[in-house]
Image: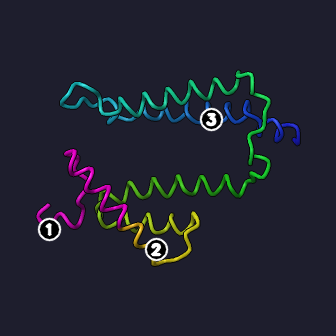
Amino acid sequence: MKRVRKWLRRNQGIGLIFSICLIVFLVYLELTPWVHREVRDGFTLGFFPVVGVVLLIIFSVIMVFDARRREVPEGVEVFTFKYFLGGILILAATGFYFTIMRKIGFLIITPVYLLFFIYILGLKSWRKCALSAVIMTVIVYGVFTCIGVRLPPGILGRILPF
């Protein structure tokens, strides 16, 4: 068991784990109907996500066979199950965020989501966390509005005229 753990910390093990996870994600994307929906410009809605995942699969497979496959990246020695669980928790919370965002709205739920994760990731002043979350939300909303992408209005869509 110790040998397997040691192997999993090398580039080869990391690349194999990434490859398996990304292949599962690609299968999920291909089985999801929205990925194949065609948009105005002739592309499918999932074109860029699928291309991105395929490229990541290629790069992770390269890690398995690369000349540096036996190296242990810096910082991986201290990686524990607690960190892995934290990563899974972040992914689950992000999935929950996207689900709730459609119902409640981008402008309401995004600052809450960012506030939580900014605090968890190390900024310990609640005032700075809140200010950062609001500023980032406004910037993202402004950029998306400028390029013509409508973010889910949610509850505010019934109250305000946007």
Image mark for residue 18: 3
Q: Can you give x and y, in whole percent of width and height, for residue 60 in the image? A: 61, 29
Q: Estimate how packed mark 3 is, as few (under 14), some (14 to 19) or many (20 or more) residues with alpha carbons within 10 Å.
A: some
Q: Residue at x 67, y 52 (%)?
A: 84
Q: Which residue is mark 1?
A: 160
Quadrant position of residue 42: top left
Closest to the camera, between mark 1 and mark 2, is 2
Residue 109 belongs to the span the image colors magenta: no
| Amino acid found under the numbered disc labelled 3 | Phe
Image mark for residue 128: 2
In the image, taking residue 145 as reference, residue 90 lies left or right, namely: right
Earlier-in-chain disc, 3 versus 1: 3
Q: Can you give x and y, in whole percent of width and height, for residue 122 in the image? A: 58, 66
Helix, strand or loop status at disc 2? helix
Q: Residue at x 19, y 45 (%)?
A: 148
Q: Can you give x and y, in whole percent of width and height, for residue 113 in the image? A: 43, 64
Q: Residue at x 74, y 22 (%)?
A: 67
Residue reaching furthest to the left: 161
Helix, strand or loop status at disc 1? loop
Depth check: 124 or 86 in front?
A: 124
| Amino acid found under the numbered disc labelled 1 | Leu
Distance (Cα) linking label 3 and label 1:
44 Å
Distance (Cα) linking label 3 and label 2:
34 Å
Q: Estimate how packed mark 2 is, as few (under 14), some (14 to 19) or many (20 or more) residues with alpha carbons within 10 Å.
A: some
Q: Quadrant of the N terminus?
A: top right
Residue extent of the magenta highlight: 135-162
Image height check: is 130 above or below 36?
below
Earlier-in-chain disc, 1 versus 2: 2
Residue reaching furthest to the right: 2
In the image, taking residue 51 as reference, residue 104 lies left or right, namely: left
